Amino acid sequence: MAAPTVLAVCVVHQLLPDSGAVGATGIDKRPVDGAVKVGKLGVYADVQADRKHHGGEKQAVYAYAQEDANWWAAELGRDIPFGTLFGENLRTTGIDVSNVRVGEQWRIGTVMLEATSPRNPCMTFARRMGLEKAGWVKRFAQEGRLGTYFRVLKTGTITAGDTIEVVHVPEGAPTVREAAAGPGRATD
C-alpha cells in the first residue's frame, strides 16, 4: 500500500461573485506548482471571502481526500477537480481525511498540521456546486465525507507529491466525522 500523499496544493484562483451575504466566494481554488509556503493562517496566496466562518488559525488549511472526491464524482456524474468546486487547499490520497481524530498531527513537507474540525457545508458551497435547490448542504453533511480543517503548528512548505506522516493520534479523541455528527462539536 502506498504512503498517504498530497496530490495537489491549491490556492484561490480568483474571488467569484456569489449571491450570499458576503457577495463573493473564495472556493475557486487551483493547484500551484512547486513548494508552497504555509503560515499560521494557511497556504500563502490563499484567500477566504467569508472570514467570519472560514479561515483563521483553527481553519488555516482544508484537506480533502481524492477517494471522497471520486465517490462524489460518481454520485453526481461530474468531475471534482482539485480545489475548484470543494475549495480544498490539499487534495490527498491514501488517508481517510474525514476519519482523522481531532488533535491528530500530520507532518507534510516541512509543515506540521493539527486536525481541528470538519468542514461545515454552507449555502455558498451549494451555490458553487449548482446544487442549492437539491439539498446539497444536508446531503454533503449526512454522507460524512466532509474533509478536515487543520491549524498550523509549524510553518514551512508543502509540495504536491509530499508524503503525509501521521505523527500523533490522541487516544480517545473523536474523529472529525464524529465531531460533525455529535453534540458540542470538538474544535479545540
Image (cartoon, rainbow, N blue to C red):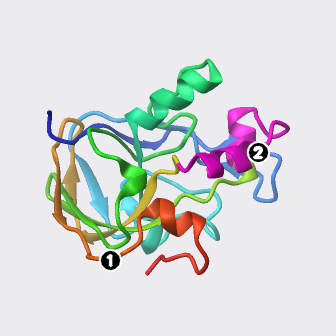
Q: Position of residue 21 (x, y in %)?
A: 81, 59
Q: Disc 1 on helix, strand or loop?
A: loop
Lateral position of residue 139 relative to residue 71, left or right: right
Is residue 118 one of those drawn in magenta? no
Lateral position of residue 12 relative to residue 51, left or right: left
Looking at the image, is mark 2 or mark 1 nearer the viewer?
1
Q: Quadrant of residue 76?
A: top right
Q: Residue at x 69, y 44 (%)?
A: 139
> How busy is the neighbourhood of tag 2: few (under 14 within 10 Å), some, or many (20 plus)?
some
Q: Amino acid at mark 2?
A: Asp
Viewport quadrant of the N terminus: top left
Magenta extent: 125-144
Is residue 137 one of those drawn in magenta? yes
Query: Which mark, by number, is residue 103?
Result: none
Q: Give the camera-side residue of 8 and 145.
A: 145
Q: Residue at x 39, y 56 (%)?
A: 99
Is 121 located above or below residue 72 in the figure?
below
Q: Give the camera-side residue of 100 and 86.
A: 100
Q: Position of residue 186 (x, y in %)?
A: 49, 77
Q: Residue at x 73, y 42 (%)?
A: 136
Lateral position of residue 47 relative to residue 115, left or right: right
Lateral position of residue 42 relative to residue 77, left or right: left
Viewport quadrant of the C terminus: bottom left
Is 27 located above or below residue 69 in the figure?
below
Disc 1: which residue: 172
Q: Give the camera-side residue of 21 and 69.
A: 69
Q: Position of residue 149 (x, y in %)?
A: 44, 61
**CA separation in Å, label 2 and label 1:** 40 Å
Q: Tell me which numbered mark, 2 or 1, is placed earlier along the sequence.
A: 2
